[in-house]
Image: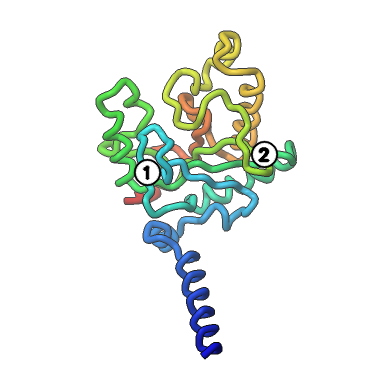
Amino acid sequence: MRNILLLLAFAASVLTATTDDRLSATALSLEKRGYVNVKKADPSIFVSLMYSRADNFTGEVLYTDLREAYLHPKAAAALVKAQKRLKQLRPDLSLKVYDAARPMSIQQKMWDKVKNTPQYFYVSNPARGGGLHNYGMAVDLTLCTLKGDTIPMGTKIDYMGAAAHIDNEASLVASGRISKEALANRRLLREVMQYAGFKALRTEWWHFNYVSRATAKKYYKVIK
């Protein structure tokens, strides 16, 4: 009887482990289409998807079954390059991804939140093809310590306002809206991302595109 109970307990533990390790439907779909799991590409990169939690600008959980960050293979390779460059410059820091490949169905939910507000231009309109996230060619990220704690960047990620813009940061520092430390950290993030081939977005210090929207529409497929 005891042996039977032990076998049942072992079988249950194996089943639980298998269930816990199993990828969600969204993750499986992305992998089947060839997108790369960022953590598998470089385990040293931190991932904390902000739309899998409610503490984002929508106030809702949008990724109900996704916890992993995926990117197109080209963008994923570039991100690994950026992480390596960061480690050369600052071994005490790491990249931390907050969003990557994004299905267009999620893009629509985000657009619905802002389409009739002054913040509409912060979210790409799905009716116009969406944005680079919808091709797995954009990433939202910040810098963090080796424990995963984020460092000052002036605003939180997905803040919709002038303090998040990168085109007039000197005045943001002069007016006290962001600190000199935050500006230095933003510049470091841009340096390593641009080194790897990413381009910064004027209105969001955390957002980086790997290709242009025109290139994405011509050569790559939208994630539906």
Q: Mark 1 vs mark 2: which is more N-terminal?
A: 1
Outermost residue on the front side: it is 1
**In the rendered image of this protein, does residue 76 appear above or below residue 164?**
below
In the displayed structure, 65 sits above or below 18; it is above
Q: Nearer the viewer, residue 92 or 85?
A: 92
Residue at image mark 1: 61
The image's colour scheme reads rainbow
Which residue: 51% across, 53% down?
Answer: 73
Q: Is residue 79 left or right of residue 135?
A: right
- The residue tagged 2 is 145
On the image, the x and y values in percent for residue 189 come to 61, 33
Please state the horizontal and vertical placement of residue 205, each as a whole percent of the image.
52, 28
> What amino acid type should be assigned to the residue bearing mark 1?
Val
Q: At which x and y percent is residue 199? A: 53, 34
Label 2 packing within 10 angstroms: few (<14), some (14-19), many (20+): some
- Number of disc labels: 2
Measuring 52% from the left and 85% from the top, which residue is drawn there?
7
Q: Percent position (x, y) of residue 144?
A: 63, 38
Q: Nearer the viewer, residue 195 or 139?
A: 139
The reply to whether residue 129 is visible in this rendering is: no
Identity of the amino acid at label 2?
Answer: Thr
Location of residue 57 (image quadrant) = top left
Which residue does the image show at 43% across and 43% down from the upper left?
A: 53
Helix, strand or loop at mark 2: strand
